[in-house]
Image (cartoon, grey):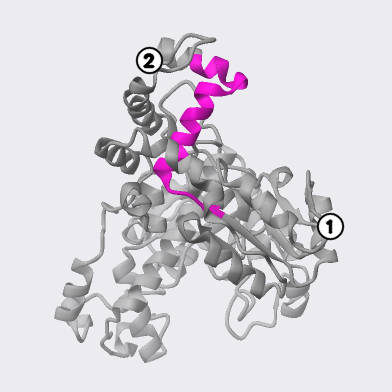
Amino acid sequence: MAQFDRFVVFAEMRTGSNLLESALNRLAGVQCHGEAFNPALIGYPKRETLLDMTRAARDADPLALWQRIGAAPGLNGCRYFHDHDPRVLSAMLDDPCCAKVILTRNPLDSYVSLKIARATGQWKLGDGRDRREARASFDAEEFDHHLATLQDFQLRLLHALQASGQTAFYLDYEDVQDLEVLNGLAAWLGAEDRLKALPDDLVPQNPEPLERKVANFPAMETALARIDRFNLTRTPNFEPRRGPGVPGFIAAKDAGLLYMPIRPGPDAALRGWLAQLGAGGIEEGFTQKTLRQWKRRHPGHRSFTVLRHPLLRAHLAFRAVLERPGMADTRVTLRAAYGLALPPEGETLAPDAEGDVFLAFLQWLKPNLNLQTNLPVHPLWASQSAALLGLAQFAAPDLIAREDRLAADLAALAAMAATPAPAFDPSATAPDASALSAIWRPDMEKAAREVYTRDFMQFGFSDWNDQAA
């Protein structure tokens, strides 16, 4: 039996958390202290202190209140919603001695209940004779935000528990009205006491069906029909997260422009362009510390990265696999384990065979990016979506330029940084495109879209041949 020294009920407004708290507080030795970290109150409305700590003191040091909850006699806890003080959330999630109870409710029911409570001003009901009535008006945009907020918080909780090897006791709104389930929770928490009956100090406020509680019910049905309940349009993404790659950044030494490469990119051409800014050439080989120093020396600095067409990047990665000495082990594996017709070491690929082998490489990339091969995802063929997320771990680029309009994008960037700049010559990147043009086939476009679905969707790429033409 797990031994806990405190607990937290992760819930939201209108999920039944008041009733759950009432049930917990009927167990001998168990005490739930309300919404202890609600920024608008401390524990409960009209309370000034909680465990002898004022609201001001809690706001100054929320972890001190969390420690008091853990140190109080018996098993103590509180309710925590997504918009409560975020400074205490990690302490709750990271502590295996803190029991996590996760209470959820159908998001539509909680949304309608919330709308009615706001309209009536009635948040609890102890006797049906005191009930105030109102009908909710469904707002599709508002509900979308409500749903996304709940889902994001639940995913954060789930990830934290999975990453730390913990589990939680999950409850739904209806479970809070099941005596056996509540006593199961008591056993899981390690409480010796059991409930003899459900709490009778609170009753459901709006037991009617939704069509009687929503003023514009037909409009709600229409709006909900557009929601992808099963997330059918989601593109699964198993690609590993990438780091920012700070040592590869290239800066103009005397001008406030910084290039954050997504390789294989037009690095040589951009290195030459940056070197022409000012009189100091380029600066590279950064650490995060030296890059921060560069930023401080260049107030008003601007950073940028460049997106290339996914098919072109894949072909450049393929050429790297063929030609780089450091890729010898990769070539061996691709030949032996996956049957790619790569030439033996020391030999070159026949020009008339390159198209077929490149297509086979594209088809291999799809399982590789989904972590279904025994080779890791190399930065040269990782998606640009993942690479951008990696860059953002240090700092998001000010400009995400496109290679096919790089001259115009760089001119605009230099103007933003108030830096006189030479024109960028697009022909500097022409050899990369020429090599792909020589072997291009329509089936390569289809294969690239299957591999880099997320990049095509996120960045609006058309077929490479249309762009190249």
Q: Is residue 191 visible?
A: no
The residue labelled by disc 2 is: 341
Could you tell whether 334 is left or right of 110 in the image?
right
- 386 or 442: nearer the viewer: 442
Q: Position of residue 156 (x, y in %)?
A: 51, 54
Q: Position of residue 273 (x, y in %)?
A: 67, 56
User: Magenta stretch?
Assistant: 306-331
In which quadrant of the rendered image does the N terminus lie?
A: top right
- Is residue 313 highlighted in magenta? yes
- Is residue 120 highlighted in magenta? no
| Main secondary structure type of the part rendered in magenta | helix
Could you tell whether 466 is left or right of 387 in the image?
left
Along the polypeptide, which appears first: circle 2 or circle 1? 1
Type of amino acid under label 2:
Ala
Q: Residue at coordinates 53% horizontally, 63% vertically from top-left?
A: 25
The residue labelled by disc 1 is: 280
Q: Is residue 218 above or below residue 150?
A: below
Q: Is residue 51 visible?
A: yes
- 59 or 438: nearer the viewer: 438
> What kind of element bears circle 2?
loop
Q: Position of residue 267 (x, y in %)?
A: 62, 46
Type of amino acid under label 1:
Gly
Which class describes the residues within 10 Å of circle 1: few (<14), some (14-19), or many (20+)?
Answer: few
Q: Residue at coordinates 42% horizontally, 80% vertically from top-left?
A: 124
